């Protein structure tokens, strides 16, 4: 129990990341530190190109910072090989992408089953998870038959299949109207608090920040207190 | 398999279109294979049916049409009869003639002059074997042209009359012309130009001194591998094995080369079309694949899944195409040289599938280059 509560789900320490080459070289992350505890729901806001997605990429072990360390649930992910990072992502990190990014050929239930299979779990029962995001009645529908909000809910359920300790969420409300945006973000907050999952959400939709435990703002690669919160 | 099958079902329209192209290519491959076998049989089935292992031609005979061009004498024949490892060496005469049957229909024949009691003498399924100087044995397929036992065929110009005394089973053609076996003595009479109008007589054959034949037909002794080159050198002949001698039949090489070239083109087209389809298909879903890679799916898993998908598509629709091709082939008119043979068709469909898979494999290899970062909105 002690490690569960004392080990941060995400611990980014003094991360620096440069993107591009030569003249187009940009400092995407400039000495960024961020600690997120299990069950905490953190939002990161900021304009396009401020480095939000880069922070998400290094937190999710999709890329490594040039300097600094990234620990997910105590594991230094930057030190892992490419293949080991992929395996680590499968079981420890959940991703929710813009507009769900579900596979068009799979039903909601199959989206969850595939996520389980990729992690070596062939006996996933998708229904309870779909139920928990209010989508059990759409289990047999493909993304083409779902609304934007429904797709996001299925996407969230999919990200939770392998019981990750960290959920990374990229602009979940980009394609949603106001009411659905609130529903989806509230669902994320509930999941974080109920399941003890750390959630980091990148957004520029300041409208939904009321559901978050903590809001940080990113400007020109630097992470700081928000100029406008709650 | 999980994703592969669901994608096949989901995008069935696109996959069916691709599949129909594969099936049509397979139909063509089967038809070409049938035509190929048919032409080969039409060209050399008379040779194929022979129990000979090799033929000795006169030294330096041009390969094409060698059977009708070559002339060997009795010294060459004798050299082969005494050679090591040769069980039988018999003279054989080859000659293509035009004739008219007793019912007035015109018939082309390849005359194979052989010793009536030699190893080349054909087994008969009806009538009697070779023996009578004016008796010929023809293949059963000639019955379709109205030839019966007792039919008299009069050869053009020389007016030599030959009578069908027996039938041998199966197709026996040479250079697309039906084979008629006749006693070598009668053949010599014809080759020497010593025939009289009407049926040949035994006395004429006896009286003729004509020490030549076209080739020496050889049968190796059981288990022996004769040193053909060495015997050729001393006998002043050029030997071709039975299979090599097919090329010495008229038009054989030209026909088979043309058809194999068309087949090779079809395989290349199949490979390229399938490759192009899977390239577009992979690009179309590259964002989905990036999402899967971001989630943590290994490149190997996605690659295997895509290859299984291509294999299912190719296997299914090639089978369909082969079935349709075999059906079509069975309905071909008898006059067409078309033979469905299992081995060439199996090889052809195997190659279609294999080359299609290679095309698909090259296309889906790009999966491993897909950057999982693409899953995140915009740039990172």
Image: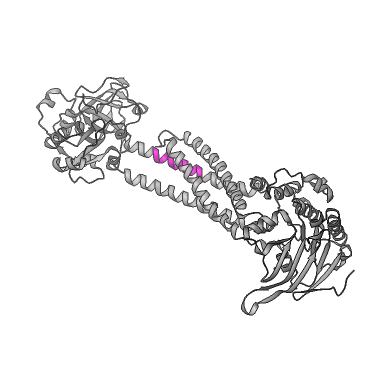
Please say whether residue B185 is visible from this viewpoint: yes
Quadrant holding the N terminus of chain A: bottom right
Residue B297 point in image, percent of width and height: 66, 54
Q: Classify B81 as above or below A222.
A: above
Q: Quadrant of residue A35?
A: bottom right
Q: Is residue A228 left or right of residue B230?
A: right
Q: Quadrant of residue A97?
A: bottom right
Main SS of residues in magenta: helix
Q: Is residue B256 magenta?
A: no
* Residue nearer the viewer, B269 or B138: B269
Q: Is residue B320 left or right of residue B344?
A: right
Q: Is residue B365 left or right of residue B128?
A: right
Q: Is residue B44 left or right of residue B319?
A: left
- Total count of labels: 0
Residue A48 point in image, percent of width and height: 76, 72
Residue occupying the far bottom of the picture: A23
Residue occupying the far front of the picture: A2
* Residue nearer the viewer, B35 or A11: A11
What stretch of residues is rendered in magenta?
B25-37
* Residue nearer the viewer, A114 or A57: A57
């Amino acid at each position: 129990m002690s490690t569960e509560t004392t080990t941060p789900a995400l611990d980014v320490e003094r991360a620096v990341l440069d993107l591009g080459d030569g003249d187009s070289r940009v400092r995407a992350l400039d000495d960024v530190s961020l600690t997120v505890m299990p069950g905490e729901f953190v939002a990161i806001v900021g304009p396009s190109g401020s480095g939000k997605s880069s922070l998400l990429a290094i937190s999710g072990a999709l890329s490594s910072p040039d300097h600094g360390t990234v620990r997910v649930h105590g594991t230094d992910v930057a030190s892992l090989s490419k293949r080991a990072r992929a395996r680590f992502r499968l079981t420890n990190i959940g991703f929710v992408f813009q507009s769900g990014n579900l596979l068009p050929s799979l039903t909601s239930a199959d989206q969850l089953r595939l996520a389980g299979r990729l992690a070596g779990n062939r006996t996933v029962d998708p229904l309870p998870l779909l139920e928990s995001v209010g989508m059990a009645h759409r289990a047999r529908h493909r993304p083409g038959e779902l609304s934007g909000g429904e797709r996001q809910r299925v996407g969230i359920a999919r990200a939770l299949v392998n019981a990750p300790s960290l959920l990374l969420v990229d602009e979940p409300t980009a394609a949603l109207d106001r009411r659905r945006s609130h529903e989806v973000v509230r669902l994320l907050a509930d999941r974080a608090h109920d399941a003890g999952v750390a959630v980091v959400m990148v957004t520029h939709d300041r409208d939904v920040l009321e559901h978050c435990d903590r809001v940080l703002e990113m400007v020109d690669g630097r992470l700081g207190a928000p100029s406008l919160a709650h | 398999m999980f994703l592969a099958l669901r994608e096949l079902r989901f995008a069935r329209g696109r996959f069916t279109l691709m599949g129909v192209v594969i099936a049509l290519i397979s139909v063509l491959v089967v038809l070409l294979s049938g035509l190929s076998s048919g032409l080969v049989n039409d060209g050399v089935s008379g040779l194929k049916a022979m129990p000979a292992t090799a033929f000795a031609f006169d030294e330096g005979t041009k390969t094409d049409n060698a059977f009708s061009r070559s002339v060997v004498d009795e010294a060459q024949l004798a050299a082969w009869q005494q050679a090591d490892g040769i069980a039988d060496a018999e003279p054989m005469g080859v000659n293509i003639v035009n004739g008219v049957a007793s019912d007035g229909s015109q018939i082309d024949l390849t005359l194979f002059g052989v010793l009536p009691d030699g190893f080349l003498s054909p087994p008969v399924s009806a009538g009697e074997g070779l023996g009578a100087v004016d008796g010929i044995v023809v293949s059963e397929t000639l019955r379709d042209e109205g030839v019966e036992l007792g039919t008299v065929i009069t050869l053009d110009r020389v007016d030599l009359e030959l009578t069908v005394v027996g039938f041998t089973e199966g197709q026996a053609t040479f250079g697309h012309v039906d084979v008629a076996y006749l006693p070598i003595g009668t053949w010599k009479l014809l080759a020497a130009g010593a025939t009289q109008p009407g049926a040949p007589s035994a006395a004429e054959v006896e009286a003729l001194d004509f020490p030549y034949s076209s080739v020496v037909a050889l049968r190796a002794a059981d288990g022996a591998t004769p040193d053909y080159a060495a015997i050729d050198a001393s006998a002043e002949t050029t030997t071709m094995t039975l299979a090599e001698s097919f090329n010495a039949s008229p038009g054989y090489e030209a026909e088979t080369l043309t058809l194999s070239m068309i087949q090779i083109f079809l395989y290349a087209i199949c490979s390229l079309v399938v490759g192009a389809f899977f390239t577009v298909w992979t690009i179309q879903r590259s964002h989905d694949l990036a999402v899967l890679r971001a989630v943590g799916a290994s490149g190997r898993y996605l690659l295997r899944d895509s290859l299984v998908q291509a294999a299912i598509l190719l296997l299914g629709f090639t089978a369909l195409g082969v079935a349709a091709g075999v059906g079509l082939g069975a309905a071909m008119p008898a006059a067409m040289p078309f033979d469905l043979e299992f081995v060439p068709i199996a090889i052809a469909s195997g190659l279609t599938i294999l080359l299609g898979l290679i095309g698909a494999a090259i296309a889906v290899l790009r999966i491993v280059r897909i950057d999982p970062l693409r899953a995140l909105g915009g740039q990172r």
